[in-house]
Amino acid sequence: MVGAAILSASTLLVKLLGLLFSIPLANFISAEGMSYFYGAYDIFTIFLMLSTAGLPIAVSRMVSTAYATGRRREADLVFSVAFWLFFSLGLLGCLVMLFGSKQIAQLQGKPGAANTIVALAPTAFFIAVMSSLRGYFQGRSNMVPTAVSQVIEAVSKVAIGVGLAAYIIRQYDSDAWAAVGAIVGVSISAALGAVYLVGYKIHQRRKDRALPQEEQPLTPRRELLLSLVRFAVPITLGACFLSVLDFVDSAVLMDRMKTVAGFTQDQADWYSGVLGHARKFFDLPGAFVIPISTSLLPVLSGAIAAGDKRSVERTASISMRMTLLISIPASVGMSIFAGPVCQLLLFNRPEVAQGAARLLQVLALAIAFNSTLYTTNAILQSFGRTTRPVVDMAVGGVLKIVISFFLTGIPEINVMGSAVSTVVSYFVIMLLNISAVRKSLPRMDRLMAMAGPVLLASALMGGASWAVYQGLILVLPERVAVLPAIAAAVAVYAVCVVLFRAVSYEEVVMLPKGEAIARLLRMQKPKPEERRAEAGQSTLPVRTEQTNPAAQSVRRDRSRGPRHMAEGRISWTRSTKARHMKR
């Protein structure tokens, strides 16, 4: 939970800075120009998933397993193999984007996006390098380098990307080239993040040299490479599948709207840009959920390697509960306030805001399904079941493309078909994943038992915050009134979560400053008897021990030193054995 909290804080900051990056662009670049931007950004999202939730997972699992079994030198060897593998893959991706930009843009149905794809090409290389470094540090349960590099990327992206785009608009009044300037900022920010991580690794290597070197034999590089590829390929496919799915869906959307629905290229670009805005807002709750799955996998893998079944079940249950606590109210809130949120963020383009709000209202329903997907993927990957998430997402992906293909060709539905297909596909993938998790962890807490109190708290939160919003719009503009309404929603939800016992005291205190949070929410520390009852243990041993003379002797001898304690345990064991023999 500490690792998740560190990543959550940094990712939340990154998402907020991402808003400062995309919102100004959306307000001074036309929807057609933003369509070119999102065309390149869809590719960037694929590389971003590789950098934060794809390839690093494979490295972090192998590194954490090596550390759990006391093989630190092998963990360093895993990193060395991964670094050169990712270096080669990143260089290949960069060259493909440089020399195949026109073909990729044509495949997307956006010929004007070719220049933005060229500007994005260096990002492929830098993100691949960061993937190996982030995976290594996450495997050591050190989330700080990942968090700091993400913040460096986000800050520099805002400063350079927005600055270049604004300069181009002011000097040349070109929306297409302004989108290119924004993407150049993305590439430069990735380079700065990679430089920081390389510097941190050099510093870490110097510190590790002072540690004693173990004498265990190392696994050959060839064997490590095969293990890494065998584990990384399905995880990489799983992490990138949703982003690739959006890429394919965008291509299908553009083709169907132009060839069947009868829209022109400019009209299709406008609708694609509006959908891009809605998806951007839809992705915001992932700032809290993806870090849970990122920090869950190395911890869970270490517990599985150590054979600690109780820790595995408890860790998985807590992670799933935290995911639901975040994602369900996010779904409810984003759906209720889709209109005013879009008006607030797209204040300079009311028509675009209105179109994005309609799409976001539908997409918001999938936030909980999508979030649960990340956590269940991490649980399955921890058990080495790396192909199952890919199979499940392939089933949902085919369903999404089929539904989108038919709906987007209807002029009255057009781009809404993509939103509907997204909700259906994520729901199906979630059900398939949960079914697979139950087979690996049959004793894990039931999903509906965890979700029930959260659903009730979210429903009350939605009703209360909507009532506050309706009262505020009598005196405030709608896009301003949504801010205090959201603050009221947070307060109501926090109270309801405690009242309905959707989260326990132990789970809250595991968070940084958790005891202070528990006191603020007036949560009471459970008594030992209640704690045993919640864990499914009997409270009888406490009373039995008091009436057992041998056990009392053990307690009396504790003050007399370890030898007497050991003798007490032995005498208790012998007396128990004698009673059983008499029976």
Image (cartoon, rainbow, N blue to C red):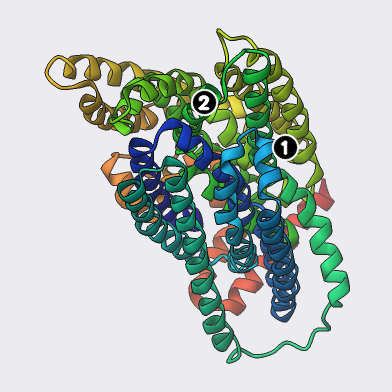
Residue at 54% over, 69% down: 194
Q: Nearer the viewer, residue 276 or 224?
A: 276
Query: Where 13 sits versus 395, above or below?
Result: below
Q: Position of residue 296 (x, y in %)?
A: 60, 52
Q: Of all residues shown, which one is farthest toward the left? A: 475
10 Å crowding of disc 2: few (<14), some (14-19), many (20+): some
| Mark toward the viewer: 2 or 1 | 2
Q: Which residue is mark 1?
A: 437
Q: Nearer the viewer, residue 352 or 233?
A: 352
10 Å crowding of disc 1: few (<14), some (14-19), many (20+): some
In the figure, residue 435 lies in which quadrant? top right
Q: Which residue is mark 2?
A: 266
What amino acid is at disc 1? Val
Determine the secondary structure under disc 2.
helix
Query: Where 202 sits versus 289, above or below?
Result: below
Q: Quadrant of the C terminus?
A: top right
Residue at 63% over, 40% down: 243
Q: Nearer the viewer, residue 463 or 560?
A: 463
Say which label, 2 or 1, has the lower sequence index: 2
Q: CA distance from mark 2 to mark 1?
A: 45 Å
Task: Tell me if 249 is positioned left or right of 398 in this view.
Answer: left
Determine the secondary structure under disc 1.
helix
What amino acid is at disc 2? Asp
Q: Position of residue 141 (x, y in %)?
A: 57, 65
Q: Position of residue 510 (x, y in %)?
A: 45, 52
Q: Of all residues shown, which one is farthest toward the front? A: 172
Q: Nearer the viewer, residue 242 or 213?
A: 242
Residue 528 visible = no
